[in-house]
């Protein structure tokens, strides 16, 4: 086989591997160590774990059920609010409380998604300390990737692991 043909075949195999994981290609194809902040923002951002670590850090200790197993963990990382603020939320001042009609959807590298409402994290409303965690129990998440932490949730469903995308959406 000619080398060119071999390379083309290998590239096809890689492409098929990517589509096989089931996530939207644009998100499954993101580099594992970067979180993209996108949607209704003034400038799309790509943040590494190092850049997440440069934002003000908060620490939260949370309990949630993973299936039927109770979990207690301490997480550190920036507030989701500060991460989105870095990208500049594009709220319309002409629309009354436009921010309260927005949500943030977190997507994991496996395509798993969960959404929080802006009113949950806004200091003028629930002011929940929703965190984009970069450490769990004092260990860097590193290759495991950042994790969305939603204090108060009884179940772990919104604790999206290996977050690759945070999208601000007008719901
Ligand atoms: N990326 C990703 N994150 C995820 C999930 C998933 O399938 N993919 N499952 C969620 C569910 S349903 C639960 S209960 C918790 C489980 O967290 P644990 O694996 O740390 O126990 O992860 C959440 N985060
Ligand atoms: Mo779950």
Image (spheres, rainbow, N blue to C red):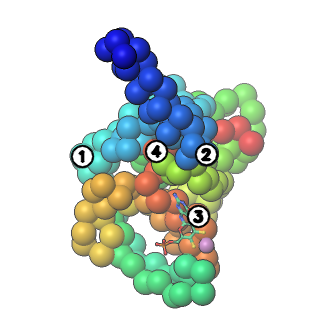
The residue that disc 2 covers is 22
Q: Earlier in the sequence, mark 4 or mark 3?
A: 3
Viewer-closest of 12 and 157:
12
Ligand 1 under 8 Å from disc 4 Cβ: no
- Which residue position holds label 3? 158
Choose the circle earlier in sequence order: 2 or 4.
Answer: 2
How many angstroms separate mark 3 from mark 1 (CA)? 23 Å
- Tell me the distance, in whole angstroms, between the alpha carbons under discs 1 and 4: 14 Å
Q: Is residue 144 left or right of residue 70?
A: left
On the rendered structure, is 70 left or right of 82?
A: right
Judge left or right: residue 169 versus residue 141: right
Circle 1 sits in a helix, a strand or a loop, which is it? helix
Establish whether ligand 1 lies closer than 8 Å to the Cβ of label 1.
no
Residue 125 placement (x, y as % from top left): 62, 59
| Mark earlier in primary sequence (2, 1) | 2
Give the class, few, some or many, for how many residues have Cα within 10 Å of label 4's Cα (few <14, many ≥20): many
Q: On the image, which quarter does residue 9 sit in? A: top left
Compared with 48, 115 (above or below) is below
Q: Which mark is residue 50?
A: 1
Q: Which residue does the numbered mark 4 point to in the structure image?
A: 164
Nearest the eye: 145 or 15: 15
Q: x, y (%) of residue 59?
A: 34, 69
């Amino acid at each position: 086989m000619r080398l060119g043909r071999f390379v083309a075949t290998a590239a096809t195999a890689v492409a098929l591997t990517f589509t096989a994981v089931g996530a939207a290609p644009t998100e499954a194809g993101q580099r594992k160590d970067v979180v993209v902040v996108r949607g209704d923002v003034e400038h799309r951002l790509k943040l590494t774990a190092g850049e997440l670590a440069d934002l003000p850090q908060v620490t939260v200790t949370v309990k949630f059920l993973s299936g039927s197993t109770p979990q207690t963990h301490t997480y550190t990382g920036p507030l989701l609010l500060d991460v989105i603020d870095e990208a500049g939320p594009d709220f319309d001042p002409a629309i009354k409380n436009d921010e309260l009609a927005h949500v943030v959807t977190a997507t994991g590298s496996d395509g798993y998604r969960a959404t929080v409402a802006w009113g949950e994290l806004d200091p003028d409303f629930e002011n929940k300390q929703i965190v984009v965690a970069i450490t769990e129990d004092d260990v860097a998440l590193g290759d495991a990737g950042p994790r969305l932490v939603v204090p108060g949730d009884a179940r772990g469903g919104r604790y999206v692991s290996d977050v690759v995308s945070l999208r601000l959406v007008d719901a």
